[in-house]
Amino acid sequence: MSASTQPDCIFCRIVAGEAHSHPVHEDDDVLAFMDIQPVEPGHTLIIPKHHYENLLESTPEAMAAVARVSVPLARALREVFSPDGIFVAQTNGVAAGQTVFHYHLHLIPRWHGSRVQLHGRRLADPEELAAHAVRIRAALRGGEDAIETESVQD
Ligand code: 5GP
Ligand code: ZN
């Protein structure tokens, strides 16, 4: 799957290394990184490197690559944050709440009593995001189902 870049797309710019992110996993097809405005600590996004506007524009192969990463990443979030649950969400179109038009899957740790919401209210402290990414990367490397990942760092 080749990465197709849309110059105005912030996620394409992150894939290309032109915009900063706190990545936790990278392989040939997929990048996962911390959401800049998390609903809860550990809120992570998984994207195909190739630009697809959303599910409707994507391919089964690209979605399979995203799904493959979602399993070890969810387990890493469980290990690091000990949430009561993990909310998986994905938006297609403005009416569905989509604000970035490059496919992304949200993994959001949740605790009993936390409000169901898709968008956080404030930008996260970058140092906190960096620290979370370090711990998630370590959990991904050390987990029972460690996945092949390039050695991403902030
Ligand atoms: P959507 O509403 O499209 O489902 O979600 C877009 C998500 O992307 C939001 O949770 C938002 O906080 C996140 N986001 C937007 N811009 C950036 C960015 O530049 N970097 C990162 N890491 N996340 C972003
Ligand atoms: Zn894009």
Image: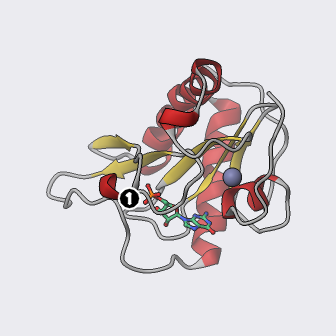
Q: Amino acid at mark 1?
A: Val
The part of the image, by quadrant, that contains residue 86 is top left
In the rendering, at what x and y percent does residue 125 appear? 56, 79
Indicate the secondary structure of the residue bearing disc 1: helix
Q: Is residue 124 left or right of residue 148?
A: left
Q: Is residue 135 left or right of residue 37?
A: right
Which residue is nearer to you in this view: 89 or 81? Answer: 89
121 above or below 67? below
In the rendering, at what x and y percent does residue 63 appear? 57, 26
The part of the image, by quadrant, that contains residue 122 is bottom left
Colour pattern of the rendering: secondary structure
15 above or below 130? above
Q: Which residue is mark 1?
A: 94
Which residue is nearer to you in this view: 116 or 14? Answer: 14
Q: Is residue 87 left or right of residue 14?
A: left
Residue furthest left in the image: 113
Residue in the image at 85% along x and 60% along y:
17
Q: Is residue 44 left or right of residue 91?
A: right
In the rendering, at what x and y percent does residue 98 appear? 42, 57
Answer few, some or many: residues within 10 Å of disc 1's Cα (few below 14, many 20 plus, some between 14 and 19): few
Residue in the image at 61% along x and 47% along y:
136
Residue in the image at 68% along x and 64% along y:
10
Query: Quadrant of the image for the N terminus?
Result: top right
Residue in the image at 67% along x and 24% along y:
146
